[in-house]
Image: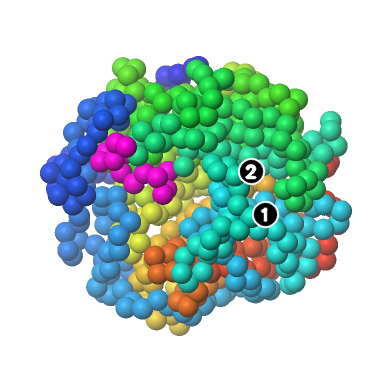
Amino acid sequence: MKTMRLSVKPANPFARSRLALSLVLGLFASSSLQAEEHGPINIVDPLVKRQTELSPDRTPPAPAPGSYGMDKATGKFIPPVATPFSHDGHPFEGQLDHWDTKSYIKNMKVEAYYPITVEPFHTWQNIVDFDGKRYLYQYVRRSLKIFDITDPKDVQLIHTKGSTWGPNGPSEEVNPYPAEDMFGAASIQWYKKLGKYIMVQSFEIRRFGVLEDKYREPEKVEAIRKSKHLKGFKVYEMNGPLPQDWKLIATRTTDIEHPDAPIGEQEGSGVRDIPAYFGGDIMYVAAAPSDKYGLTEYPNDLYNAGYQSWDMSDPSNPKLLDVLTVPGQIVGEPEHEAVFKANPRAGNRASWMGARMSLFIPKPVEQGGKYGYAAMGGMGLYVVDITDSSNMKVVGHVEFPVSVAGTEGDNIDVSQVEKTGLIYFSGYPLAEDCYEAAKNIYAVDVSNPGKPSIKHTLPRPTPPADAGFTDFCQRKGSFGPKRTGYYTQPGVSREGILPYAYYNAGVQVFDVSNPEKPTIGAYFVPPFDTKNVVSYAMGNLTHGTYTEYDRNLIWVFTNHGFYALSTPLLGEPSFEAPKKPWPSRD
């Protein structure tokens, strides 16, 4: 296990504002205010207790009325400087008093719509071809649906496990998974040595529905420590499109100190989000390898995850190669604690620290790739040399302006880097009504891997002139970027095109063909469906995109169903069966 020794000195053009904000947050420290609003502090877990001992409680107070909101002169929303962690509604003057049931579209076409909802908050997707047919997997933990999308205009639901959401929330589970089992975020790749698809599913600790506030719910903290499910990953031979065709060939925990620990005794976070696996000999995952990786302020998470590399040359026998740790992750180690304390987010009881997703890799190391890019929330961006996967090395680091609350950095789009030297780093909003600092998409120049630098931000989406509002914050719900899909999308990402899910602003397609002058070239903003979405999920409008680059189709996933879209920016769409199977067998 390595600890990379890096300077914690700010190294970006926003450092001055970032440090100024840290001083502001220090002045606003108020643990008594937080206790009044959310109940008394009650910490029993020694690791959480130690984390809170490292800094005073600097929870930002609610912003003063008039300090944020609509600027009547410009028609633009001025975001708050900082807010406490909150999932409650916070309407403001000038906001719509109703859910907007209109849709808005530019340079796109709705090819099909399917009112089927696996879950309104978040889902993962994969697309796999079998015997000339194309299948879409949409899932989140215990809920899975498999669609035949061979004809995008006549999609067929062929398999369901778990719940379906509607106006009353989730249905009763159908065809349920065994207790504590699920469908984990997956990479599916063609494995040439076997001549089969291999699927790796991640199994991470469940937080939502278990823990809301680790500073006040000691019993729930203990429940996560002793979770009755795997903390790691599973590997399957995928011999057909349905679960009955899949053969489990390996199970591993990411608990490096207790690799043989049974379920219920495994430590750490398990594998977070989709593993970075391309069908070759090496896989990379995001994982906190023990409970000691706990230096994070985020109230419903216990772990600050780093990265692991695994030897997958025999998928039935994965072997751990390396663990990458960066300064500021480990409880009880003075060097780590010093770095954590120096971060201006320390004590804010809101910031996500560490990895949420695996390394973002533009070219697999088996094909000559050299670098992976790590999004570590409030710890910034790391450039990682992966040429020797048994000895991963950090070669560059850049920090970003503090943006409390919400997730400050979990996604990196690397589709343009080999052409332009730019990657796109972003977090996403967690509050509704824009009750948090603005979430930007940062263009980062990594052409010199040792000195990554922030170049600019992508433009902020704005409503069309015929909308009944001038800023998307007025539309209610959440507003901000999520992701551009995943590296498992069929075909090859298009140069100059970045389709982002943008919550209440639908899908926004950024044209970065001129990297110095990015624009929004197309968008589709779906309606709020007030009849078919349960009230508490209404604001989470658009949470995902998944693009078929080989058929020029963008699938958009919302809280009321999913859409198939086309745009001239991608080219003429195809509605025929794909000419070459995906995942690629080349």
Amino acid identity at mark 1: Tyr
Number of other residues with Cα within 10 Å of mark 1, as a class: few under 14, some 14 to 19, many 20 or more: many
Task: Kindly identify which residue carries mark 2.
Answer: 186
Task: Judge whether residue 494 can be spotted in this image.
Answer: no
Amino acid identity at mark 2: Ala
Q: Quadrant of the C terminus?
A: top right
Q: Is residue 459 left or right of residue 79?
A: right
**Secondary structure that dominates the magenta span:** loop
User: Residue at the location (65% across, 63% down)?
Assistant: 554
**Stretch in magenta:** 207-219
Q: Earlier in the sequence, mark 2 or mark 1?
A: 1
Task: Kindly identify which residue carries mark 1.
Answer: 137
Secondary structure category for the residue under label 1: strand
Q: Is residue 300 left or right of residue 247?
A: left
Residue 355 part of the magenta segment: no
Residue 58 horizontal/vertical position (percent) = 20, 40
Report the label total.
2
- Answer yes or no: do the residues labelled 2 and 1 have beta carbons within 8 Å? yes
Task: Judge whether residue 250 can be spotted in this image.
Answer: yes
Number of the label disc, if any, that sits on residue 562? none
Residue 533 horizontal/vertical position (percent) = 47, 70
Residue 208 part of the magenta segment: yes
Is residue 264 or residue 551 the one in the foreground?
Answer: 264
Residue 567 horizontal/vertical position (percent) = 66, 68
Residue 254 horizontal/vertical position (percent) = 55, 27
Task: Establish if 170 lies above or below 61.
Answer: below
Number of other residues with Cα within 10 Å of mark 2, as a class: few under 14, some 14 to 19, many 20 or more: many
